Image (cartoon, rainbow, N blue to C red):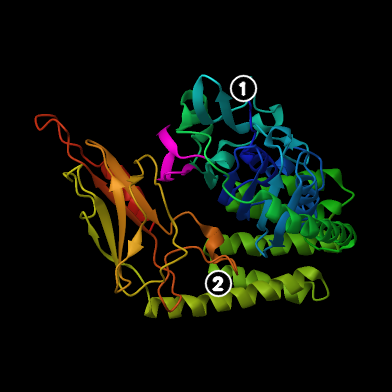
Amino acid sequence: MGRIKYLLFFLLPFVFAAGCINGQAVFSLNKDGSGKVSIEGLFDYPAYCLLTDEDCADGEKFFVEQLKTMVSSGGLAAWSGVNWKVLDDGRCYFKGTAYFSDINKVDFFIGSAKTGIKLELARRSDAKPTVELKLQDNFQLDPQIRKLPADIFKTVSMNFVAAMPGEIENSENFQRLDNKTVMFVFSGGQWLSYLRNNIVQATLASDGSDSFDYKTEIGGAKKDYAEILKRIETACRNAHTSKDSNSISDSKDLSLKARLREGLAAQEQGNFERAVKIYEYIIKNGRADEKSSAGAAYQIGVCLHKMGRREQAIKQFESVIKKYPQSPAALKSEKMLADISLAESRKKAEEKAKVFVVDTIPKLYAEDVDPNTASIKITFSEPMKKTGWFYSSFAPADFPAAAGKPAFDSTGSEWTLPVALEAGKIYAVAVNCGDDAKLIKNFQTGFQSVSGQMCEKFVFVFATSQADPNAEPITIDDEFIERCEKAK
């Protein structure tokens, strides 16, 4: 049988069109090529806008327009469970499941950005099926993407999970979650070069059976799909007619528009000091209209807040309300003041009732762990919920291969993960790290207490002893330990 290529993954367009990503994409593939992908995550200000003259200072307008192109991508049979929301800080939350009858015909795109990464299922008559995550043949970054700051790619944090139609016989550079499921973590700025230089694949023992009943699910999804398209069309019309004071690129002054893009780019890169100076220039140069000035003043408050200058941010938002009382920016400033006050109250409440890790087996940062250890344990300060956990890798350490299903003990405080360790390696399991999306309403992924309190972030690190007792012992680098501590 000839080689059949199933294109699955579409991370790169999100990087290009959506900037920072925090979330997860879960694929389920059937042996006939049908399947589905469930996506949930947060997307920051569109990186694409930093390189073009396209008017996307209005984050909601731009996001909805890009969402419209994505749900209409070629080869998709339907979507279900689609929800989205633009948050006050400009980030966009998205959740939805896409269905396809023939993955070979799927062509995901967001705006003008198409996929550059694929998951390939190859079947040959003389070999077992293999699944490989790789860059497309002759893949080259779009010239526009090459212009993006390197920090854009460092902000990517996304778990790619794939449920296979057959049992996995062996895998290379995939993390195996169970006998039919693998995971690859896109995190930091090195994942692109990693895919260029490493094979990431799994070999299936046989064609196996379907991951889910496609015919049953697609019927309901098609009914949802029509309604989803109507909702998106309505959102697009509303976005085009809305009067958002923060859309300051509507100014007729082209140099002012360029200044705006420069300020937004500085914010995206975390250079808030520079962004503040740019917004101050927009206000003081005398050519900005009131709407543009109000929007720039509001953005200054946002920058101050992100820099941790709470009192200055409060004064800035109060100034916007006083100077531009009738503007939408004033309403946004009132909302930010309320959010700051609420956050302060929550912080005080959380400090009184924190949930944290109290012990681990093996001990944290141990460097002589027996590689034959069959399980690792994490003990929490109080009983925890037994579902909805979030744990992930923490580069550059290895993630321990799962040898069974994790579970809590009868008290709900001790969590055990069966593992298959190797000699001479440093392992890390990150608890509740890198998952900003869990803070969104109805998206509460993470280790939580029975009372609903989220556990503090924690990175469980240890190293196994060398197979050769005469070999130099494995040591955990001080710089890596410092990174783990800062992640908490």
Q: Which residues are magenta?
A: 166-184
The picture places residue 35, in percent across and down from the top left corner, at 64, 44
Instruction: Give the overall secondary structure of the magenta segment.
Output: strand
Residue 182 lies in the magenta-colored region: yes
For disc 2, the marked residue is: 311
Return the residue nearer the eye: 218 or 312. 218
Q: Looking at this view, name the residue that lies furthest to the left.
A: 470
**Residue 147 drawn above or below residue 177:** above
Q: Secondary structure at mark 1?
A: loop
The picture places residue 59, in percent across and down from the top left corner, at 74, 55
Q: Secondary structure at mark 2?
A: helix
Number of numbered discs present?
Answer: 2
The picture places residue 223, in percent across and down from the top left corner, at 80, 59
Residue depth check, mark 2 versus mark 1: number of the one nearer the observer: 1
Return the residue nearer the eye: 228 or 363. 228
**Residue 339 drawn above or below residue 112:** below
Q: Residue at x 65, y 27 (%)?
A: 141
Does residue 191 appear in the picture of this structure?
A: yes
Left or right relative to 312: residue 466: left
Q: Residue at x 64, y 23 (%)?
A: 140
Badge 1 density bin: few <14, some 14–19, many ≥20, Cα 10 Å: few
Residue type at the position of mark 1: Arg
For disc 1, the marked residue is: 3
